[in-house]
Amino acid sequence: MGQTLTEKILSDHLVDGELETGEEIGIEIDQVLTQDTTGTLVWLQFEALDLDEVQTEIAAQYCDHQTYQFDFKNTDDHRFLRSAAGTFGAHFSRPGNGICHNVHKENFAAPGKTMLGSDSHTPTPGGLGELAIGAGGLDVSVAMGGGPYYIEMPEVVNVRLEGELPEWSTAKDVALEMLRRLTVKGGVGKIFEYTGPGVENLTVPERTTITNLGTELGATTSIFPTDEETRDYLERQSRGEDFVDIGPDEDASYDDEIVVDMSEVEPLVAKPSMPDNVVPVREVAGESVEQVIIGSCTNGGYEDILPTAKMLEGREIDMQTEMIVAPGSKQASEILAREGWTAELMAAGVNFSEATCGACIGIGHVPASDSVSVRTFNRNFEGRSGIEDDSVFLASPEVAAAAAIKGELVDPRDLADELGDLEAPGVELPDQYDGSKADLIAPDESVDDGLVKGPNIGDVPLKDELEADLSGPNLLQMEDNITTDHIIPATQDILMYRSNVPKLSEFTLSRVDDTFAQRALDSDGGFLVAGENYGQGSSREHAALCPMFLGIEGVFAQSFARIHKANLFNFGLIPLTIDADTYERLEQGDDLAIVDDVAAGVRSGQEEFAVDVNGGEWEFTAHLDASEREREILADGGKLSHTKKLAED
Ligand code: F3S
């Protein structure tokens, strides 16, 4: 039996386990990327692991999420990140040089390699045949130190592309069509592998738009095979030597198959406020549009902005509409400027932003209240634009530019009929991507002068080994569906303390009980109790790290969200499940004591633990569901302590 492309890359990198769907495997990582909001913790953890040099082939630190300096904290973070890159041997991309996925694609992504990144759209370089996966910062630190990355082997789904895109339909519409069919949950536990005769009809930048949006399907990653288009792209980036001919075997067997006939894909939009709320543009035509933004890691490339510039050449945007171009990278800005397209866009009424995430996370260009904004981004979750009742449509650059010309949503085919002289711009790559690399500092160019930590950058706390006796009060009795946002709110005024765990911890669970943090510190240990689905939401590791800092020993819940449960293990907090009757009977303030020897039980595979309530008043049973590896991590006091211990042995 032949292998899929995913299986080929994974078997080349496999260091633990077997490639059976659902089984835990450990893989070697070739490249890592991190960005400024997650990177500070990545490097603080790297330091705490006593690692002194990056072991992966490539490690790259980008500054893209918070490049505007509201006060000293972001600037301090960037200075720290620069010093960490210099000290430990990573590439450093200055603030303003571009979004991590765009700059990584241009400079480092390579076919057949594995990549781990502490950002959810890490799968973007899958369009170049790289197997790229998003993960928590601690996993990235460990991988950067040469440790394997562990993951349950996902299902591999064959997405067979047929035909060719018609005029005015784009790769963004292919990705939106996938979201329309599969929804935002359709890719959970899956890798989408694109195959079929349609692949050769897409350039690499179009492929990376599709792999970028695979994240919105919930997929582990998405990947394309390589071909002459890949070789051509790498040569235009002056990296022809990175080309490798790689694809699935003819008789590869997949867990599932989806067929997309691209010749039938029409211009689509995702309506507010979910990326899978997809309809043909014609269904919402006539909706008046106040703001249009071209950019983000999805459609911020030269190849995305050029069609817009061609459509706007010699025209002006509608009087009632504002239009912003936020290039995904400085390389894109620079080539557009050299070719004269920046001036054309400016003359049409467009304003330029620096190459940053910016508006994609509500930093700048916040839409007016009760107005429609059309954006080429990948997410339109309610409130993400920076205003609670926003109305953000996701679309291709062509649909967005058409909206700017008309001042309302319009199918570009209809606008072309109406105007008579508007031609479909198509896709065009520059002869050579010859932007300067002045803002990308290689490890051997940077200064190795040690870490520079401003007052907002603290150390990462370490936890001791799990003890035999675990007891303390029930510090907070919570309901069902407590999210990571409840545990650590993600608002700008709180997240600016992301590198300062003691300060950030003051906000732990403040949305549930604003006395919690102080009570936890005063109590010298204790537990959290919750209903179903505790820790749902993002992969934010601070949601486990901050409770750990406050001395929380473990969480009793009816059930846990998968990623948060992994984070609890990573930070040494024991996640124990309880039944509904126990949950109902427990009260905040109860004194809880695990009767069994916890350390020995966790190490030996014990699944049930007896818990005494209020010194013998009553007793309940709690369950620990954990793999052998997770048990060792927990018993050693979390992944940092565990990894340090392994290194010492
Ligand atoms: Fe940045 Fe938005 Fe992409 S935050 S990494 S542009 S999804």
Image (cartoon, grey):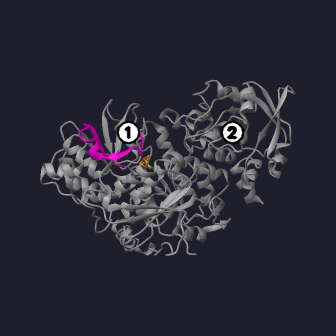
What residue range appears in magenta?
273-295
At x 66% / y 33%, what residue is drawn? 531
- Whether 606 is among the magenta residues is no
Is 82 placed above or below 473 here? below
User: The N terminus appears in which quarter of the rendering?
Assistant: bottom right
User: The C terminus appears in which quarter of the rendering?
Assistant: bottom right
User: Type of residue at label 1?
Assistant: Pro
User: Type of residue at label 2?
Assistant: Met
- Give residue 410's quadrant in the image: top left
Is 19 placed above or below 297 here? below
Secondary element under disc 1, as helix, strand or loop, is: loop
Outermost residue on the left side: it is 420
Looking at the image, residue 626 sits to the left or right of residue 500; the answer is right
Say whether residue 643 is visible: yes
Say whether residue 147 is visible: no
Establish whether ligand 1 lies closer than 8 Å to the Cβ of label 2. Answer: no
**In 3D space, how far apart are the residues under numbered discs 2 and 1 (Cα atoms)?**
37 Å
Kindly identify which residue carries mark 1. 272
At x 55% / y 63%, what residue is drawn? 255
Label 2: few (<14), some or many (≥20) within 10 Å?
Answer: many
Tag nearer the camera, 2 or 1: 1
Residue 480 screen position, x and y as percent: 62, 32
Is 77 placed above or below 104 here? above
The number of callouts visible is 2
Q: Which mark is residue 548?
A: 2
